[in-house]
């Protein structure tokens, strides 16, 4: 059961992304909502395994009461991604002549704004729970080295972004994920990651759509 939970956490989002991309050419709201429901169901099963058969404690996943310090760290991470990493990434993409996130955004923007808000909230939260909180804690419990416990979920996290966004954006996601992973290993507090992840995606997907129209 423990290995099932780990497999679902690492490969489940990638499988959902592949299935979603196959129908993304002409996205339908009902199918998109079904995908989000399946994602929530996936996270629910993984957490049930984590706190049941696996015997993990919430604090091992970084699930702690939200504090002012956690919120401040979340804002700090958000500012880093918006003011430092994002502009630098745009320059790199332009210099290499890479399309970047445009292809994926064009597909997502065919869906209504309220759905994008929902998808951003679910996606950012789920990815931090699965790839940072649960996967790292579970691998550590199984005896994996700190490097493997951090690196394996990070690689899969980046790969899960290939179907929608492409290879170059997935590589940039690997770097951003490394920042989230390093911060989680330092603080063992998932709240700042969730705050920064959801807010960054909100700016890059939802607000960017409003500016583009």
Image (cartoon, grey):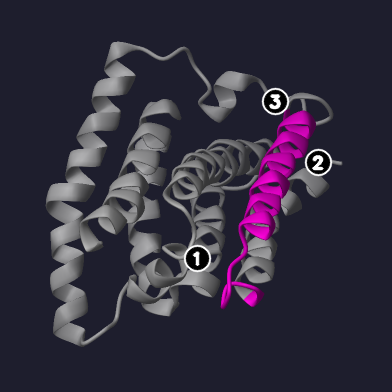
| Circle 2/circle 1 CB separation < 8 Å | no
Task: Determine the CA span between mark 2 and mark 1.
Answer: 25 Å
Question: x, y percentage for residue 120?
Answer: 46, 46
**107 and 188: which one is in front?**
107
Please report the bounds of the magenta region as a residue range: 22-50
Q: Is residue 56 left or right of residue 147?
A: right
Q: CA distance from mark 2 to mark 3?
A: 10 Å
The vertical placement of 15 against 153, above or below, is below
Q: Tell me which residue sits at (63%, 57%) in the image.
A: 32
Image location (x, y in percent) of residue 123: 52, 47
Number of the label disc, if any, that sits on residue 56:
3
In the shown orientation, is residue 186 left or right of residue 27? left
Closest to the camera, between mark 2 and mark 1, is 1
Residue pictured at 26% horizontal, 56% vertical: 208
Q: With 9 as the anchor, is 195 left or right in this view?
A: left
Instruction: Examine the rendered structure and indicate whether residue 17 appears above or below residue 36.
Output: below
Assess whether residue 26 is covered by the magenta stretch.
yes
User: Badge 3, how many Cα within 10 Å: few under 14, some, many 20+?
Assistant: some
Which mark sits nearer the N-terminus, 2 or 1?
A: 2
Q: CA distance from mark 3 to mark 1?
A: 28 Å
Q: Quadrant of residue 20?
A: bottom right
Location of residue 68 by image quarter: top left
Q: Which mark is residue 161?
A: 1
- SS type, badge 3: loop
- Residue named by callout 2: 2
The percent position of residue 27, horizontal first and vertical second, equals 58, 68
On whether residue 82 falls in the magenta region, the answer is: no
Depth order, front residue of 38/110: 110
Seen from the viewer's position, the closer of residues 112 and 32 is 112
Q: Residue at x 72, y 34 (%)?
A: 44
């Amino acid at each position: 059961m423990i290995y099932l939970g780990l497999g679902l956490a690492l490969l489940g989002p990638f499988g959902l992304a592949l299935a979603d991309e196959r129908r993304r050419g002409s996205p339908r709201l009902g199918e998109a909502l079904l995908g989000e429901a399946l994602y929530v169901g996936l996270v629910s099963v993984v957490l049930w395994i984590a706190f049941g058969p696996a015997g993990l404690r919430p604090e091992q996943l970084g699930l702690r009461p939200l504090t002012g310090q956690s919120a401040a760290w979340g804002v700090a991470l958000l500012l880093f991604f918006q003011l430092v990493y994002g502009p630098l990434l745009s320059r790199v993409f332009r210099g290499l002549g890479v399309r970047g996130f445009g292809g994926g955004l064009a597909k997502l923007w065919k869906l209504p704004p309220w759905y994008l808000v929902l998808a951003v909230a679910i996606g950012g939260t789920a990815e931090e729970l699965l790839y940072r909180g649960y996967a790292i804690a579970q691998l550590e419990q199984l005896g994996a080295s700190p490097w493997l416990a951090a690196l394996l979920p990070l690689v899969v996290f980046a790969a899960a972004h290939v179907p929608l966004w492409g290879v170059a954006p997935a590589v940039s996601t690997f770097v951003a994920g490394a920042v989230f992973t390093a911060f989680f290993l330092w603080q063992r507090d998932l709240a700042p990651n969730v705050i920064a992840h959801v807010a960054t995606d909100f700016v890059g997907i939802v607000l960017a759509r409003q500016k583009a129209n």
